[in-house]
Image (cartoon, rainbow, N blue to C red):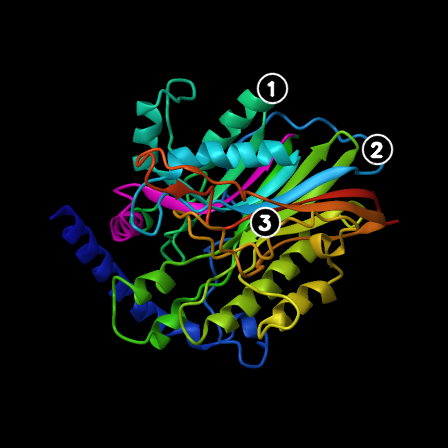
Amino acid sequence: MRRTTALLLATSLLAAVLLVAGGPARAAIGGLPLPTGVAPAVPGQLVDDGPLAPTPLCDTEPAALPLPGPAGPLRVGTYNVLHTQDPDGNPTALQRVGMLADAIAESDADVLGLQEVAKSATLAAAAAADGLDDDDEVTGLMVELIAQDLAASTSEDWSWCWFASNAHVPLEPEPAAGGGGGPLTELATLGSGQQTGNGSEFREGVAILSRFPIASPTVKRLSLRMHEALYCDEIDPTGCQFAVVFDSRVIMHGVITTPDGPVDLYTSHLAHGVTSESDATKARQIEEGLAHIAATEDPATPTFFVGDFNTEATGQPDEGRYQTILAAGFIDTYGSASSQDASDPVGTSSQDVVGEDLTVDRTIDYVFAKHLGVVTVTYGDIIGDKRAERADTPGADWVWPSDHLGVVVTLDATPSG
């Protein structure tokens, strides 16, 4: 009954939002021309600054004044950590949190952008039952649990910032750190958790995880894809329409205060394919992300743009989106690495989380960099390719850290100029 009620409430809310979508989604925003074939969009947030601007939720040491000098060597990575469950709806996240932390620790990464980072009441209950806590409070936030595991294994404090991208009701102000807080968004969150089998509290977003303090963390919502509801194959309010109307992607920025100086890190998780218009949505979000970076980065320090771009590189139909990022001055650092592990898998995505074999076949996760005056990408590798016996069904199956593999690169660099 609770699930049915939540879905009915979410469907009613969806219908109201779709009425809103029919108007402004059909006009260019602010009179700016849009690329050919890219559908216009509704702005992703009500305000860009002020007291109701979206604010990340962070646990980071106070940032010291950055030291002068080059930034490097530095291990920078990206990792899509697959929220809280496997495709069968079984909650494997608590076991996978430890596996993710192990993969990150073994990689010697210094800073990573994470995607599909969940905050879940189900995960909180599992963590509490397992004796995990943080100041006697278990939040069920994956990045916090990963940071705790890393602190234990590396004997270092790890800083993190997180912001939820889903679910979010378009244009509603966000008074809560980490996103949401408005009554409509909280209702949509309830519907999303019930829809995905994650319970009454489930949010998913992006995070920055770092050995070093994270200064000046900010987040910006990218344009919505609610117009894609008109292109769903069928009327399915709790499926396709729900997925695109409440899907609100973000780009998060933090200044990482390394011992050798600051670097700008941006992380995002671009839209996944749902309708025939999804490719246009991805192209627009890449352009908006690049514009946001250009407007907020410090060109005197290295800039990293990392994440799950849902875009393949050379030789694929979506190569144009990849080339758009390179044309903005970025390099694909893993692709440019002077040394790579020959045993690394080919691809980063489409892994079966529960199963015996490694099945990745697509590369859509990248560590892009620019403003590197003298740069040698000395080493690049793929992480997260080690399985473990599944804890809740011992002897019956295997579990992998995520349905993605991570990418970590080592750079020796000095800022341009």
Q: Nearer the viewer, residue 375 or 381?
A: 381
SS at badge 3: strand
* Vertical arrangement, residue 197 with respect to residue 128, above or below: below
Judge whether residue 81 can be spotted in this image: yes
- Identity, as a three-letter code, of the amino acid under mark 3: Thr
Between disc 3 and disc 2, whose residue precedes? 2
Q: Nearer the viewer, mark 1 or mark 3?
A: 1
Residue under numbered circle 2: 68
Residue 411 place in picture, x, y as percent: 77, 43
Residue 25 place in picture, x, y as percent: 42, 72
Residue under numbered circle 1: 155
Q: Which residues are magenta?
A: 187-211
Q: Is residue 191 magenta?
A: yes
Residue at 49 percent across and 63 percent down: it is: 223
Residue at 41 percent across and 57 percent down: it is: 171
* Vertical arrangement, residue 346 with respect to residue 18, above or below: above
Q: Is residue 269 magenta?
A: no
